[in-house]
Image (cartoon, rainbow, N blue to C red):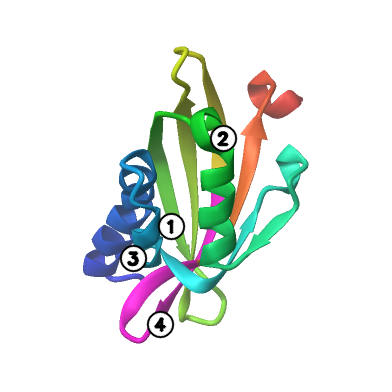
Amino acid sequence: MISPEDRIIIHELISLHGHLVDDGRLDELGQVFSPNVVYDLQDFGLGKLQGLSAMQESARAMGDANPVGHHVTNVVLTEGEDGHTVNARSKGIGIKSDGSCGSVVYEDVIKKQQGEWRITYRKVIARRAPLGGK
């Protein structure tokens, strides 16, 4: 069972991503993601980024195309089958500099490494149709 303390820590971990990226503090993403994180952007045709440096390089390459605001909400946590992993599903809203916005779902695998929770896998799924397209 996920303790109440771990739930709070994990919620804040998920929230910290947007603050770091929006502030351009890409070198601090190790506070959120494991060094060997897999950042799955296949739904956007961008494949899977392997490791923190690939994530940072991708964000820098996007430059002004990055959202100015990453907002996360509706975080739901479930304990993984091994008892040492937490699976998280949350909603993300990205606001672009021109005021347009988009919605995504984050599917995260979070593990405690060296006493700290870190996201080891994140899949980003674009929301393109109401009701899940059904």
State which mark lies toward you, 4 or 1. 4
Pick the front one: 22 or 6: 22
State which mark lies toward you, 1 or 2. 2
Quadrant where the N terminus is found in the figure: bottom left
Question: In the structure shown, which secondary structural element does the residue marked by tag 1 occupy?
Answer: strand
The residue singled out by tag 2 in the image is 104
Q: Which residue occupies the extreme bottom position in the image? A: 114
Tell me where residue 85 appears, x and y as whole percent. Answer: 49, 74
Q: Which residue occupies the extreme top position in the image? A: 99
The residue singled out by tag 1 in the image is 77
* Mark 1: amino acid: Leu
Quadrant where the C terminus is found in the figure: top right
**48 is higher (above) or lower (below) than 98:** below
The residue singled out by tag 4 in the image is 113
- Of label 2 and label 4, which has the lower sequence position? 2
**94 is higher (above) or lower (below) than 13:** above
Q: Is residue 1 visible?
A: no
Does residue 5 appear left or right of residue 63 in this picture?
Answer: left
Tell me where residue 120 appears, x and y as whole percent. Answer: 53, 69
Pick the front one: 99 or 81: 99
Q: Residues within 10 Å of mark 3 (few under 14, many from 20)?
A: some
- Of label 4 and label 1, which has the lower sequence position? 1
The residue singled out by tag 3 in the image is 31
Question: In the structure shown, which secondary structural element does the residue marked by tag 3 occupy?
Answer: helix
